[in-house]
Image (cartoon, rainbow, N blue to C red):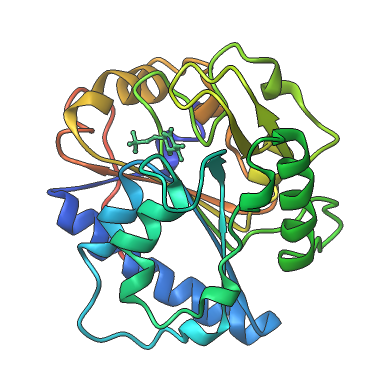
Amino acid sequence: MSHIRNAAYSFESVAAVGAGLWTLLERLSAEAIAARGFFVVALSGGSLPATLGDSLPAETTIDFSKWRVLYADERCVALDHADSNHGAAKKALLDKLPVEPAVVATINPALIRNPQAAASYYQARLTALAPAADGISSPRIDALLLGMGPDGHTCSLFPGHALLDVKERSVVHITDSPKPPSTRITFTFPVLNAARNAIFVCTGDNKADMIHRIIDLEEDVPSARVKPTLGKLYWFLDAPAASKLTLPTLTFKL
Ligand SMILES: O=C1O[C@H](COP(=O)(O)O)[C@@H](O)[C@H](O)[C@H]1O
């Protein structure tokens, strides 16, 4: 049986997905800070930052001063470029939060023309900010917020690409991304599957076919390979994204 089937929650709207996400983040952040003193969150690009930024709760107990923010993938462009995941996250989300710029781990802009060096630099930052623990040798992210493209890719891990098999590195570069821009850096599966919580956020009817294929038909696409070894998996779907599912989804409550 698909591991995703037991992790798929549907919500009536994007706003409801966002509200559910903030409820979950509030709990995960409090638990991580109580256990380790800080909360490591990794953001994806695409539609995710706006889903979070547009649904910020009016009141929250989240202690943002203890957050460490990373990117699950990033495009090798300047930080203020229209294609930058950080640029999009800053505008849609981070500028609305009391998070100090110093705790946000961006790609090194001096290295964007040397993607291999950019990946190595980012791997060092990831390793420093998200220590390995509990017998798992990869960095451990507390809340890994993932998107999924209509082709089933997550981060910059695309169907059929050799990067799907990387085991020895936490962050790698890609120069032939089928989705522009072609040059990027990305977390690898060892990091994704070391997460304490991996949370997919999929909204919109352009995701419905792929959601059906991976949950009902159990197809092996990159997103379906995210299965945290010692962590918990969530798939948060809005009604259009869940519209082609034949199997039931779960109702989210803490
Ligand atoms: O290129 C990317 O696409 C995926 C999916 O984006 P979405 O707009 O369909 O939500 C995203 O998760 C990834 O971070 C980004 O680089």
Q: Residue at point 79% right, 50% down?
A: 138
The picture places residue 207, in percent across and down from the top left corner, at 27, 27
Q: Residue at point 71% right, 58% down?
A: 140
The picture places residue 225, in percent across and down from the top left corner, at 58, 29
Name which quarter of the figure residue 49 lies in.
bottom left
Q: Is residue 190 above or below residue 105?
A: above
Name which quarter of the figure residue 202 lies in.
top left
Q: Is residue 204 visible?
A: yes
| Ligand 1 quadrant assignment | top left
The picture places residue 50, in percent across and down from the top left corner, at 27, 54
Front in this rendered view, residue 157 or 223: 157
Q: Is residue 179 above or below residue 202?
A: above
The picture places residue 128, in percent across and down from the top left corner, at 78, 65
Q: Quadrant of the C terminus?
A: bottom left
Q: Is residue 252 visible?
A: no
**Left or right position of 118 against 149:** right
**Left or right position of 244 against 217:** left
Q: Residue at point 63% right, 37% down?
A: 185
Q: Residue at point 31% right, 61% down?
A: 91
**Left or right position of 251 against 78:** left
